[in-house]
Image: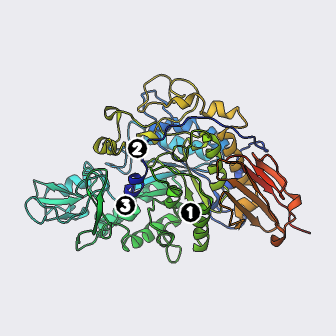
Amino acid sequence: MGNLRGWRGVLRRNIRAWSWRGIALGVACATPLAAAAAQRDAQGHAWWRHAVFYEVYPRSFGDANNDGLGDLSGITQHLDYLRDLGVDAIWITPCYPSPQVDFGYDVSDYENIAPEYGSLADFDRLQAEAKKRGIRIIFDFVVNHTSDKHPWFLESQASRTNAKRDWYVWRDGKGPTQPPNNWTSIFGGSAWQYDRATQQYYYHAFYPEQPDLNWRNPAVETAMLDVTRWWYTRGVSGFRLDAVNTLFEDPGLRDNPTVPGRNAYGDQNQVRKYDDNLPENHRVLRELRKVTDAHDAVLIGETWTDDVQQLKAYYGANHDEVHMPMDLMFTGLGRVPGGHQRLDAPTFRRHVAAMEASGEWPVYVVSNHDIPRVATRFADGRHDDAIAKAIGAFYLTLRGTPVMYYGEELGMQNNDPQRKEDVRDPIGIKGWPTEKGRDGERTPMQWTAAPDAGFNTGAKPWLPVPPSARTHNAQTEGQDSSSVLSLYKAVLKLRHENPAVREGGYVPLNEGDPNVMSYLRRYRDAAVLVVINMSGEDRTATFDLSAQGLRGAAGRPIIQSAASGDLSSVKLGPYGIFIADVKTAP
């Protein structure tokens, strides 16, 4: 969930390419170091700083009871795979009881498990089994709103004078049929829903079935902080905070400025000046942080921002807000006319430089459950696997913490519905055909080449498995040293074991090269050179590392798809990769 307006207004789902291309890896794959699960690493950093996070969409990961929907036991069954991949923490999207209007982001009970996903006993088993493997559990916390079926809202809706009326944002309209202002829902239409019984409007930044909590009410804050304490006691290691930029609205309810054009739902475009990213958000985040730090846990923010400075604010002026505000700007880099994206070295170079200049610890994301899969967005139909590997090798070797999305490591692509009657996501139902919804990036995890991709043992999955599962699945790719999965395993192994990649600074190289992204990761006497060809043509990169105090001739390739690995002339095929240890000069 989050501010998808800008993203989906640009990217359309018309990209269909399933070609396969492999590269050779110069390293065997292994599991991450057990030390990665320690509370603090050898340098005294908190555990999350160098962890690899992995988002699991529970409806789609594994269906243990064979009813067509994924469940918590299905996640438990695949923990060995996650451990062997190199995952340190899994973020599970909402699995609380819910009417499922927005597939769990409409919560009706914050302190239980939805029966379709299992039970609290199933969660306890998942937690215990994950702990045995050095994997932490992160829960999704829907902080902005509840379901309209939550007991809090049912009481709030009952009358104007009940004790929970002010737990939500209720206002009089401008007239009998006019909402309080011009604010629009992120999911289309007015952000105000009229309640005939009490003759007032309530505010909903998302669906009408997702009324916004009134975070200006101290009782709401207390209740929500208590929810986090309840789950921390149960064993979770942190929360991903959903839609944190929408917690507060302008108390004066001033109209948002309008701009030319209309969105996929036909609404007049707006600048969300008065209902998004308000300063009051930060005080609440500081309170959540206090509770979280008391449990040595982590807060991850779904932070949709316009620039790096706005993102920086979510860390807190005293680093007392969100530990890990996600850099979701990263998902939109390289856009070209028509909504596609392409790897563009200068664009990525500038963005990484801006993050480095911020002085913060970056949190890079390339895919999630709300935006099309990265392998689809960048596919060219000829080099799809090579592009998927190049993206993985790039962002997983940057300074910072990565948050992966399930199946990304396989090169999974979108499988978008082609008919409105096949759409499950309400966004797609409402916005069709301009907006096809998010079903395409939420299809079942591709475990095997079986008809249902090993998701279950025969029941029809809740979303169809794409044809690409026959070639892009964990079983097949696990046996192929040139697969996307093998590349991801190799790079994640490098992250865990090499101090330069784990701890080191970022040093850009050859900054004038328009096609090849090159940089060093340096830590004390350790240095790793990363070279990524971001073009579909053969390229050659040359390096004189003497200014860095490094002896270039001593480079030892670790991972490569390069035709030549001599540091004086690294020859790269289309979207080729070269990663090498470089020794410091004596």
The answer to which quarter of the image holds residue 547 is bottom right
Disc nearer the start of the sequence (1/2): 1
Looking at the image, which residue sits at the far left?
Answer: 176
C-alpha distance separating marks 2 and 3: 28 Å
Which residue in the structure is indicated by mark 2? 438
Residue drawn at 61 percent across, 43 percent down: 409
Nearest the eye: 65 or 25: 25
Q: Are marks 1 and 2 in contact (CB under 8 Å)?
A: no
Q: Is residue 338 above or below residue 439?
A: below
What number is the disc on residue 9? none
Give the residue pinned by disc 1. Answer: 296
Of 416 and 459, nearer the camera is 416
Packing grade of label 2 (10 A; few <14, some 14-19, many >=20) is many
Classed neighbour count for the residue bearing mark 3: other residues with Cα under 10 Å, few (<14), some (14–19), many (≥20): some
Three-letter amino acid code at the position of disc 1 = Asp
Report the side of 575 relative to 453 (left or right).
right
Give the labeled residue for mark 3: 224
Asked if residue 517 can be seen in this view, the reply is yes
**Horizontally, is 152 left or right of 472 in the view?**
left
Amino acid type at mark 2: Arg
